[in-house]
Amino acid sequence: LGEDIVKIMGEHIHDSFTYNFVRGSTAAVYPGEGKYLLKAYQMNPDFPGLLATVATYATSTHNLALRQEANKMWFKKREFPISLINHAYNTLQSVAENGVLLTQHDNDTYPVWMLQDAKNIRTDILVINIDFLLFDGYRDTIFKQLNIPPFLLEKIDVNEYETNWENVVQHFLFHYKGDRPIHIGLTVSEKWYQPIIDDLEIGGLTRTFKTQPDFNIKLFERELILDYLKADLEFTTLLPRIREMNTGYLFFFDEIYDQLNLKDKQFVQEVAHEIISNNEIFENKEYYESRFH
């Protein structure tokens, strides 16, 4: 098993890059083996896959300088499909000034952090991946920073992710009383915040409690990169996930469609048709087919 292999590696090749990287990168968001990861990082920072793990460790330990350093190097490698970078850019533009953005997955989070760190885009936003909130050390610091009461996982096994996600997200949303606008990325499962979903409005690629007048129209006209949605022009194994993430644009288009001129409506129809045709099954598909026919 993995634990046995790492132990044997430690006995025989404890000074190697391989041992330090493997031992330092097996704990997901938990930074307990960080010293081994940092040693591997010093030995070979260009090793494929290493920078993602370093960015994770830096986030878990609230080491922004290290995350920025890793993301600047990672950005230069151009490993993310441009579709994910565009989606990340549009998500950041969807957040109000000085806002807090909740995300859930790798592909809706790491490109966002990368744009903040490597390109200085919307660094006013605090981006929180809810996976990290299941780690006590990270969660305690974030909740203290945002003046949210402490939350205990109690006796729920940390591997029961769905229960923990629901509990920690709802605790966050129910107890946050600060001035920073809260935004929930449309890639975050609605199950985690179902009790308050009717209190939220669509703001770009997010849900939030209150948008400014004409916020979505201004996003459409001035801020968002949308032409890339016309066609899939990249060859990437992430294409199914990208197509799934793009269904979030349908919520946004639905919000603004009636306010658009004829030319912009035709553009939205074209893009929406592309998104719908690329996803066989998703909620309210028939509605969107009719809406943008």
Image (spheres, rainbow, N blue to C red):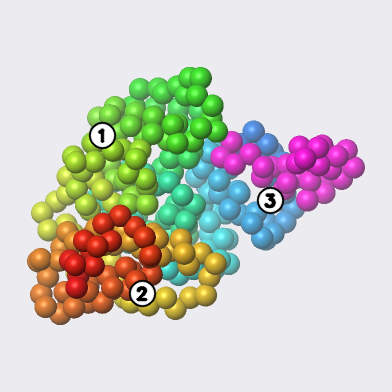
Taking the spot 40% from the left edge, 60% from the top edge, the residue there is 244
State if disc 2 and disc 3 touch (CB < 8 Å). no
Q: Residue at label 1?
A: 195
**Residue 20 is inside the magenta segment:** yes
Distance Cα–Cα, label 1 vs label 3: 43 Å
Tag in front: 3 or 2: 2
Q: Residue furthest right?
A: 12
- Name which residue type carries label 3: Tyr
The residues colored magenta run 1-30
- Which secondary structure class fits the magenta region best? helix
Q: Earlier in the sequence, mark 3 or mark 2?
A: 3
Q: Which mark, residue 41?
A: 3
Q: Residue at 10% of width from left, 66% of height from top?
A: 258
Please give the name of the residue rendered at 38% of the width and 65% of the height, measured from the top-left corner.
Answer: 279
Q: Earlier in the sequence, mark 1 or mark 3?
A: 3
State the CA–CA distance, disc 2 to disc 1: 34 Å
